[in-house]
Image (cartoon, grey):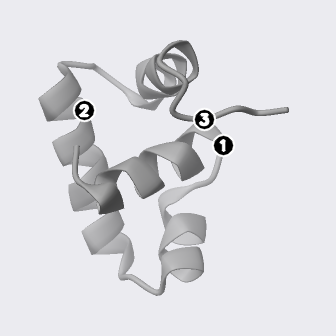
């Protein structure tokens, strides 16, 4: 994943919506949607829940 995709994945894993991520990163919601779609495709995942589990299992995000 690119650095931006990792950043988006971390925020997805923290439960943020695309709109919230877009506001936080100063991006359009459409751009965030594209990043999420790319993340799911690259990691061969079906949805945001699976992406969150992936991030937790691989140490990409720590929710503590």
Query: Which quarter of the picture shows residue 20?
Result: bottom right
Q: What residue is pinned by disc 1? A: 15
For marks 1 and 2, give the CA distance.
Answer: 16 Å
Position in image of residue 12 (x %, y %): 53, 45
Q: Quadrant of the N terminus?
A: top left
For marks 3 and 2, give the CA distance.
Answer: 16 Å
Cβ atoms under marks 3 and 2 closer than 8 Å: no
Q: Secondary structure at mark 3?
A: loop
Tell me: residue 45, above or below residue 38: above
Q: Secondary structure at mark 1?
A: loop
For marks 3 and 1, give the CA distance.
Answer: 12 Å
Q: Observer-nearest residue: 19 or 55? A: 55
Density class for disc 2 (Cα within 10 Å; few <14, some 14-19, many ≥20) is: some
Tell me: residue 63, above or below residue 35: above
Looking at the image, tell me whether mark 3 or mark 2 is earlier in sequence order.
2
Q: Which residue is found at the position 47% from the left and 87% from the top?
A: 26
Q: What residue is pinned by disc 2? A: 40
Position in image of residue 30 (x %, y %): 28, 71
Foreground disc of the pair 3, 1: 3
Residue lying at the far right in this picture: please name it.
64
Say the numbered circle drawn on residue 23.
none
Position in image of residue 63 (x %, y %): 76, 33
Query: Which quarter of the picture shows residue 27?
Result: bottom left
Q: What residue is pinned by disc 3? A: 61
Q: Secondary structure at mark 2?
A: helix
Q: Observer-nearest residue: 33 or 8? A: 8
Q: Which residue is found at the position 31% from the left and 57% from the top?
A: 3
């Amino acid at each position: 994943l690119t650095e931006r995709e990792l950043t988006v994945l971390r925020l997805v894993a923290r439960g943020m919506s695309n709109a919230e991520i877009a506001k936080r990163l100063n991006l359009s919601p459409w751009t965030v949607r594209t990043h999420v779609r790319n993340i799911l495709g690259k990691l061969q995942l079906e949805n945001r829940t699976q992406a969150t589990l992936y991030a937790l299992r691989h140490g990409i995000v720590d929710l503590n």
